[in-house]
Image: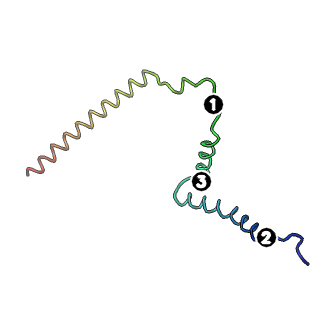
Amino acid sequence: MKPKYKTTGCFRFFIFFLIFIPAVFFGATYFRGENGFQIIKDFYHKIVGKPASSEPDAKSDTYNTDDCKTELKRLHTENDDLKRQLREKENEIKTLKTN
């Protein structure tokens, strides 16, 4: 008994690639240690974009001045400590070279 519908070679080719291309893409991204779904989402949002809001949220773009001052002070002390360590290491290298 003959089948009711007969598929052509071109249709089989397209069905094969409909299954093969996503499998290869997700396999390659998994092999590289990336997230294939996230890549697709990022690409989609880059093309479509997000709707622009009429009022920008000012609270998310600004920092509290007290927080900035404390962070700046912490970074200055860390920078000073690193400079001190660098001077100590340079002095140690000089003493080792002279011996």
Q: Which residue is mark 1?
A: 52
Give the residue displayed 27% in from the left and 38% down from the top: 82
Three-letter amino acid code of the residue under disc 1: Ala
Placement of 88 over or under 23, stated as above or below = above
Q: Which residue is mark 3?
A: 36
> What is the quadrant of residue 31 in the picture?
bottom right
> What is the quadrant of residue 4 in the picture?
bottom right
Placement of 46 over or under 77, stated as above or below = below
Q: Which residue is mark 2?
A: 8
Q: Residue furthest right?
A: 1
Q: Residue furthest top?
A: 65
| SS state under label 3 | helix
Quarter of the figure with the N terminus? bottom right
Q: Earlier in the sequence, mark 1 or mark 2?
A: 2
Give the CA separation, mark 1 to mark 2.
47 Å
Q: Is label 3 in contact with label 2 (beta carbons under 8 Å)?
A: no
